[in-house]
Image: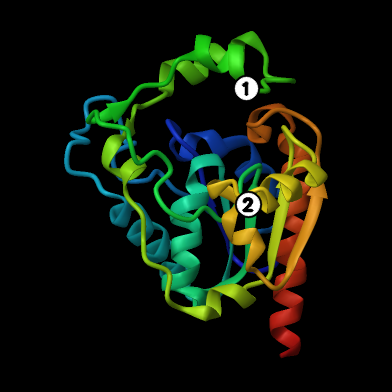
């Protein structure tokens, strides 16, 4: 099996390692996979004081360009904001966009955040987020490897000017909330989903589980992304 190259971008506090199981499954199916660690997320020792939103957008577009042909770009959680900006900046390199329990965010993700970085709190996540299917061992490893999110990324945004982004084929994989919920939240004005109101070609897929399906349902997530990759390659070959 083969398909369009796949680029995987993790959400806040995570590096490429978060995709290890999903990427391994996809490679076992014959797919070409690149998982990113975005700038500032390399380690807890990294200086995050000057990392910007544009740095994250540029890193995503660089990975898209490095693939050498149009990719399936899968972004998770907070990466939906720079991911959508990347579709504005390098739309020609994206065969298909996948939002994993997130959406095409517009504006800053947290304009009022004033600190240099935002550490992860497992206690806060357990109180406020859907962690269904994530084991205690997985949580411990996650905490061990988590890196604070750069504050400049949370405060930053990009001006979207390229209408080509509106026609990029897009799939929303909905996990912690249903696709019906996400559509309603988008219509109600949620900024992290705002792009759904303007995109012209969106499919919705429900995979009920945690907000971090790469940990709780890696096989199911990999199968969906792999199928999209195969279909994107076939569509590109026919055009």
Of all residues shown, which one is farthest toward the bottom? 239
> Which percent across, then down, holds residue 99?
63, 52
> Which percent across, then down, holds residue 198?
63, 68
Local secondary structure at mark 2: strand
Q: Residue 99 carries which label?
A: 2
Q: Residue at x 17, y 43 (%)?
A: 50
> Which percent across, then down, holds residue 184?
75, 47
Q: Residue at x 79, y 55 (%)?
A: 204
Q: Which of marks 1 and 2 is in front?
A: 1
Residue 113 left/right relative to 95: left
Quadrant showing the C terminus: bottom right
Local secondary structure at mark 1: loop
Structural distance between the alpha carbons of marks 1 and 2: 18 Å
Tell me which numbered mark, 1 or 2, is placed earlier along the sequence: 2
Q: Which residue is drawn at 56% across and 39% down?
A: 19
Q: In this view, does 36 lie above or below 73?
A: above
Q: In which quarter of the image is residue 152?
A: top left
Q: Mark 1 points at which residue?
A: 129
């Amino acid at each position: 099996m083969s398909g369009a190259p796949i680029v995987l971008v993790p959400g806040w506090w995570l590096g490429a390692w978060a995709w290890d199981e999903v990427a391994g499954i996809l490679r076992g199916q014959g797919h070409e996979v690149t998982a990113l660690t975005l700038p500032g997320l390399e380690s807890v020792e990294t200086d995050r004081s000057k990392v910007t939103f544009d740095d994250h957008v540029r890193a995503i577009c660089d990975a898209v360009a490095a693939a050498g042909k149009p990719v399936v770009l899968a972004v998770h959680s907070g990466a939906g904001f720079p991911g959508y900006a990347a579709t504005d900046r390098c739309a020609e390199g994206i065969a298909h966009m996948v939002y994993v329990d997130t959406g095409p965010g517009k504006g800053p993700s947290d304009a009022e955040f004033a600190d240099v970085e935002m550490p992860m709190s497992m206690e806060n996540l357990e109180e406020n987020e859907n962690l269904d299917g994530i084991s205690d061992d997985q949580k411990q490893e996650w905490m061990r490897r988590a890196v604070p999110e750069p504050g400049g990324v949370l405060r930053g945004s990009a001006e979207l000017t390229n209408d080509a982004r509106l026609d990029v084929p897009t799939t929303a994989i909905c996990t912690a909330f249903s696709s019906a919920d996400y559509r309603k939240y988008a219509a109600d004005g949620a900024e992290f989903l705002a792009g759904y109101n303007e995109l012209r070609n969106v499919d919705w897929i429900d995979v009920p589980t945690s907000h971090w399906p790469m940990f709780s349902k890696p096989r199911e997530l990999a199968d969906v992304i792999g199928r999209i990759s195969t279909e994107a390659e076939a569509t590109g070959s026919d055009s």
